[in-house]
Image (spheres, grey):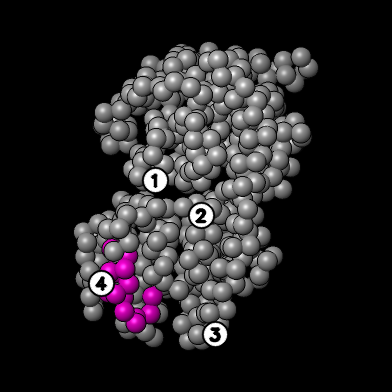
Amino acid sequence: MGVVARKGMLVYKIYRALSYVVSPLLQLHLRWRKIRGLEHPTRLPERLGRPSLTRPPGPLLWFHAVSLGEGMAAIPVIKECVKWRPDLNILLTTTTMSAFEVIINQLPTGVLHQFSPIDTPAAMDAFLDYWNPNAIMLLESELWPNLIMASSRKGILLALLNARVSMKSFKLWSSPVLFPLISLLLSKFSLIIPLSSMQAIHFQLLQAPPFIINFAGDLKYVVEYDASKEEFRSIDDLKVQLGHRKVWMASSIHRGEEEVMLGVHKVLKQVYPDLVTIIVPRYPQHGKDIAQKLQKEGQHVALRSQHQRIVPGRNIYVVDTLGELRHLYRLTPIAVIGGSFFPGLAGHNISEAAAAGCAVLTGYHVGHFSHMLREMQRLNPLSVLQVAGKLELEEAILKFFSDGKVLEARQTASKQAFHALSNGIIANAWNVLYFHVLKQALLKDNR
């Protein structure tokens, strides 16, 4: 064992000891989250590694994602696994309630769901001993030391899909204290699929073995949301309500960004009195807060969760629900992707709007989505327009509304770029995953 690995093992032992000591406090914290509605009311034991489902016999693959975005990115890969290996059992774990509420209706029949265990020795060991997976697929940047080290000890193969590390995390992980631990953790993986070449460089600088890094493409290009007949009818009904009115959407906005969007709405409404602005905050509660504030100011607002209709005189439609964004993009020719207009924010997935054929705009604070933006602009410079703030956003939307040819060129460019970039990603991801991980993991059928 080299010097870095020895240091990494020392740091891990310290982490393991600390995580053991703070376990009682973490359990209290989970109970507090349950009281606040942030944990499932009846499934809290799952967070401590105690199952609520029976493990079926035979080989099992465990996919782990924290939140909604990562969970939805995992589903196309899970579907590909089901397609090619229907004999396998598949378990998906998520952490957040928002992810659970949407994903539970998107999973293929037979795929199991549990809430992910906290990264304490007792919870993780209990989880792994019970589920005994053949392989574990972690999404994006889920480098939990107890999970990874315990899996490695048990001979369970590990893969990191859509792997990324933010610049903030990269600097932190490169520090003298954490670098040996991160290097040790990455050495336990059989496969890392980075979402961009820059991310691949980051992982190599963190001493991930070069031979385990393989490219397949960004899974967020191929996220799917299966809507029910009722949901499709609801979207179609909204389309009828909008009629021939001018429409634009501000999606995935964070607190503070609504002021930018409402300021733009005010200017646009002076030119187009029948305008409809659709606002889709990142979190539903933010939507309720926006609607309440606007109603106090005397503005006519329709709130989606209340099934309020877009009637004449209502110019703002606030969506305070989850899991509908991909379908809502069908309602608008223009989509402004939030989480990108203030420093400290890191952007959101622009490919869903492009897939729907929207003219796509976003701010300059796009974080790790910068690779997606650059790829789309490289294929067609008209596919995504970045704007610095309220004034530039006003000018751009006014131009789109006033010149149909300019708007159509933007819509066509975004859709073409999306199709070019999304082609073959799932097949690539499955082939790489099967060759580097599953083929070997599934040899261990005497489990």
Above or below, 62 against 263 in this view is: above
| Amino acid identity at mark 4 | Ile
Q: Which residue is mark 1?
A: 106
Crowding at dot 4, Cα within 10 Å, few <14 / some 14-19 / many 20+, comes out as: many
Viewer-nearest residue: 21 or 199: 199
* Residue in the image at 69% along x and 25% along y: 187
Residue type, numbered disc 2: His
**Which residue corresponds to mark 4?**
310
Where does label 3 land, which residue? Answer: 405
Q: CA distance from mark 4 to mark 2?
A: 27 Å
Give the magenta range: 234-247
User: How far apart are the two marked residues, 2 and 1, measured between alpha carbons?
Assistant: 21 Å
The percent position of residue 237, horizontal first and vertical second, equals 28, 69
The N terminus appears in which quarter of the rendering? top right
N-term mark: 1 or 3:
1
Q: Residue at x 31, y 51 (%)?
A: 285
Q: Earlier in the sequence, mark 3 or mark 2?
A: 2
Judging from the image, what secondary structure is the residue with disc 2 in? loop
Residue 75 x %, y %: 48, 43
Q: Earlier in the sequence, mark 4 or mark 3?
A: 4
Q: Residues within 10 Å of mark 2 (few under 14, many from 20)?
A: many
Residue that mark 2 sits on: 348
Q: Position of residue 430 (x, y in %)?
A: 61, 41
Under circle 4, the secondary element is loop
